[in-house]
Amino acid sequence: MNDFRDFQNLTETSEEERDQIDLLEYVRLAWKHKWSILGLALFGTLWAMFIASSKTPIYQSTATLLLEEPMQGRIINIQDVYATDSKSYHATQIDILNSQSLAEKVMERLDMTPELPTEQTEPESEPRPSSMIGEIRELVVEQLKEQLQVLGWRPAEYDHPSRTEVIKLGAINRFRGGLTVTTQQGKSKLIHISYRSPDRHLAARVPNALAEVYIESELEARLQMTSKANTWLMERLSGLREKLRESETALQDYREKEDIVAINGSSTLTGQRLESASTQLNEAEKRRNQIRMSLEQIRGFSHASIERLNSVPAIMEDGTFASLRQREGEAQQTVEAYSKRYGPKHPKMVEAESNLESAQESVRARLDLILAGLEEEYKIANANVANLRRQVNAATDEIQQLNRKSHELSVLEREVETNRQLYDRFLSRFKETKEASDLEKVTARVVDPAAPSLGPIYPNKKKITSTGTLIGLAIGLALAFLLELMDKTLKGPKEIEEKLRISSLGAIPHIRLKKRRKETPLDHARDNPNSFFAESIRTMRTGVLLSGLDNPKKVILVTSSIPGEGKSTVAMNLANSIGDMEKVLLIDADMRRPTVAKHWGLAKETKGLSEFVSQTAKLGECVHAIEDSKVYVMPSGAVPPNPLELLSSKRFAASITGLSNTFDYIIIDSAPTLAVSDALVLSSHVSGVVYVIKAASTPSPLVRDGIKRLQKANAHIIGGVLNSMPITTKNKGYGRYRYLGYYHKEYYGSYGYSKETGV
């Protein structure tokens, strides 16, 4: 019992540590499928090496070009013909280097232009179809065209490109596809021209040729622009000269017509008079506005409290109103004080209220006087404002007349001065441009010419190979995780509780039997009582016995989902283990594939269950005692035509009842649940069912189906047993279920058990 509890505690501890060793579980999973992963990685490496070796090597060479902004040789004072924005100048030159025109010139210089086919003249008219169908089709098309033309349709004429143009344009695009022009970010003036080609010498010649063509085209463009500028300047100078003469004549005619001698003095006196009148007008309007605001505030006295009038300037300046307000406040305080001490009809209270009312009337009367004075003052201020505005308007009209003459005179003088300055500057720039036309400065030069590359830049065999290896590893790991996810088998006792929702009776380790000695699991347990295998059987026995302390389960059925899960081995070893303490009977009810007689050394024709139930033999002939133990065996006996009828008969039920009175425990080995219905019938005659599952073999959905069938038959399932489970994880890849081996190694090792022999 203590051993069973220790095993359960160790199992729970391992389950709690599961979340802390996820990384280790992934490593174990990869180790489990290591050969598949490594094989896929090797395949990816070989595949990448093949791809890399099949690629055509591409070479790249780079020429470095130093690009300087052109000198500002100005023609006029705003811009010159070379004016550029320094921020976008380099970007513009890069676009020029990538242009189709420069690419075409480089191809012509390096003799890279493809051979163009000679254009063949098309026949003037195609021969008419000789067949009747062709003539009918042509007639229908002509009639349709005539009808469409009547409706206003005209056939569109398309200028299709010739084959020569298509071939030429395709060659230029391929050339530009291998060209790369870049520059460093920031203020660097260096431009890198790179070209990729299978020919390493051609990859070096193209950047150098492009740099030369670019420099030559820049010089040619600058010379053409200078020539155009000179021509344009000469035309402009002749026009400016005539325009200057006309503007000077117009200025003199205007002075004589208006008799203008000195206009500045008159405008000064009038301006001073206007300024004085405007200042007085502003002050008068300001005073009028103040009076109007005071009037509006006082008139709204009925809608506002008297306290708000304290902010009105006219009220604030009146001392009498302030004293009246003070007396009113004192009367108000007296009323409030008397109201707390006397009643409303008390003489003092009546006198105080009378004083308050008198003070309030005085305040209102003073407000009426202040309001009347303000209204009179407002009329005077308004008349003053009107008078000053008339003075300002008169001065303004006089100044406007003077300004009109001054403006016209200024326009004429300004036009004369502008024409003179423009003419002088054009004349000066024309002389400078003419002298500098033969001294154009080169704005670009080759700093580092391109040289043939020593090795290809593509394909990068190391990168491709490493990428293939990584892809192979990734696919291998993905497949390993996918296989693990698709694996629905049970690998640990804890999964019996998690996935099947039944109790776990433990795990029976996988053992290596000695084939030469024809050793059976039962022989191994007997010969090695201190082995892992024997201890796991005792643990299972403890779980079975502890499950029925209050109501002992005397008749126990052992079954599984499908054949080959070791249910007979579990049944025989469970009976043998219980036989160490109690009198137990092992019945082989798997009549289709009986194995009990063979493992216990009984003859094949030995009488057993079928003879006992059919009452053709006595109990002593059907039950066989095992020497030196309390174990009794009842083999299946002769196989009946229909075993299910025998097991579901009333005689079988009566036989089990009689045997349970003779033996302390009865272990029944039954056929698999999903194979036949024998176990479902037997479950109604037993106290409990032990369900055997083969570790890492039987899919959990099958096990669930078998358990559901038993539960529908109202069978009491004691628990499940995980059979044939590896002791350690070495070379097995069972990952987190390593605790079984750990348990046996650490726990039983202290009692002197051997790891290799189990004894």
Image: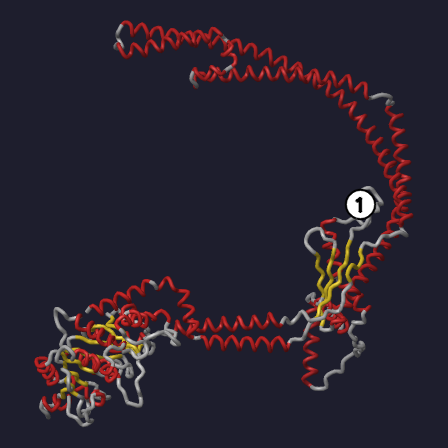
Nearest the camera: 513 or 664?
A: 513
Query: Height in image: 7 above or below 558?
Result: above
Nearest the camera: 508 or 82?
A: 508
Q: Which residue is mark 1?
A: 79
Percent from the top left, x then y, of residue 229?
Answer: 86, 49
Percent from the top left, x then y, of residue 91?
Answer: 72, 55
Residue at (8, 80) in percent of width and height = 661
For the residue labelled by badge 1, is the local secondary structure a helix, a strand or a loop?
A: loop
Callout 1: 10 Å neighbours few (<14), some, many (20+)? few
Give the amino acid at mark 1.
Gln
Asked if residue 157 can be seen in this view, the reply is no
Percent from the top left, x then y, of residue 244?
Answer: 89, 37
Percent from the top left, x then y, of residue 559?
Answer: 23, 80
Quadrant location, the N terminus = bottom left
Name the side, left or right, on which 577 lies relative to 184: left
* Residue farthest along the bottom direction in this orientation: 605
Query: Height in image: 319 above or below 640?
Result: above
Name the side, left or right, on which 644 lies relative to 295: left
Quadrant for residue 552, please give it: bottom left
Quadrant for residue 398, please give it: top right
Query: Height in image: 182 above or below 719?
Result: above
Nearest the camera: 441 or 604?
A: 604
Residue at (53, 78) in percent of width and height = 43
Residue at (54, 75) in percent of width and height = 44
Name the side, left or right, on which 339 lies relative to 229: left
Name the side, left or right, on which 43 lies relative to 755: right
